[in-house]
Amino acid sequence: MSLPSRSQHLPACFTFSAQHNAWALARGLQRLGHRLEAVTEQSGLVSRSRRQPSPGDVLFFTDERSLLAFANQSDQYRFHPRNVDPRLVDDKLAWARAVAELGERPVPSWELTGADPAAAPELPIYLKGRHSWVGSRRMPRGYICRSTHEVERAFLAIESDGCQPSQFFWQRLITGPISNNYSVCGFFDAEQPTRSVMIVVQKVLGDGPSVMSCGAVVETVPDPANLQARATALLSALTFTGPFELEFLREDATQTYYVLECNPRFWMQHGLFVDGYDNAVIARYLGVDPPRSSAEGLPYRSLAWIDTLDLIRRLPSLFTSDKSRRDVYLDLWRRNRAGRTRLVWSPDRMTAIATVAAERGRTVLQRTQRALGMG
């Protein structure tokens, strides 16, 4: 089902989270004159809805669980992607196999056959969760194993978490700095390629030390190795239409860029389009983008997406022990002052300060209640 055109009345807009990605969506929709509501029990950065979506409403997905709940339904709601294979939405092993069958190069992966530490194909290795969600449960991302002992510990952790070994698989561990993680992201339209828009981004800082960590700072970069063309070929073969983030990992030893994962939904990098590229992704999602005669690439612009909540939470350590992280922020600030890089804060700084202050207040209250025997 097509989304509303510019001349049509736009129904209500809903998402199913209230954090970073939802905040960026709300900001982008506001610029188009629309309001986003979050269908979630948890409070956050977007107002919670007092009702559930109704047929005809527009849905925005920022997680696999909500996308899978609506995927392949009848045309009651308006959203992208439609008719997507559920295995490719949240089965990382199935994704790796599909990528290989289409002639691309995924990170080498192997099926797990039992909980035998000696069966690991190679060490070090990543014992990775096949799914982000099983039902309503958020699953562990995985375990980095550099020895047989660490493999044994990983299987014990799986058991203690109430998970099954069949919910995991082996994946080659590609080590290196967080900056070895690149993504092609944007909006792809397999039926009308001239509507497709994409940029390449690189992780600069993560919320942890591993190359698999979530990004705390992400920057746009010139395409380092024809990644946009690879993304175009892969998404075309999958006849995909919708917002996406296709993730690559670079192996330093061979300078190979492996396909890691595809997020067929809104992701943190899409906030860069709101400020730097005329809200291009949300406009295409809603079908209000201007016509284009060709699928020319977007011009490179130096933009940096910053997880403002992560920055505020880490402020004490930035002034004491975390010098390397502090240097990254100082470099961004200097480049921004010189007009060389535009900073995209998510959420805005005042919202982040208020959110972290509220978190700290709740923590102090809970500790006080426990100390007094009230909690």
Image: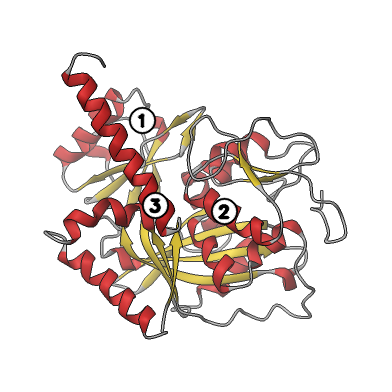
Give the vertical position of 115 relative to 318 (above or below).
Answer: above
Is residue 230 among the parts visible in the rendering?
A: no
Is 7 positioned to the left or the right of 208 in the image?
right
Q: Position of residue 111 (x, y in %)?
A: 40, 41
Is residue 70 among the parts visible in the rendering?
A: yes
**As drawn, which residue projects farthest toward the top?**
373
Say which of 77 and 36 sits in front. 36
**As drawn, which residue projects farthest toward the right?**
7
Q: Amino acid at mark 3?
A: Ala
Task: Give the structural element (helix, strand or loop) at label 2.
Answer: loop
Q: Position of residue 372 (x, y in %)?
A: 18, 17
The tag on residue 266 is: 2
Q: Residues within 10 Å of mark 1 (few under 14, many from 20)?
A: some
Q: Amino acid at mark 2?
A: Phe
Closer to us: mark 1 or mark 2?
2
Question: Would you name the residue on which mark 3 appears?
Answer: 352
Question: Would you name the residue on which mark 1 appears?
Answer: 165
Q: Amino acid at mark 1?
A: Pro
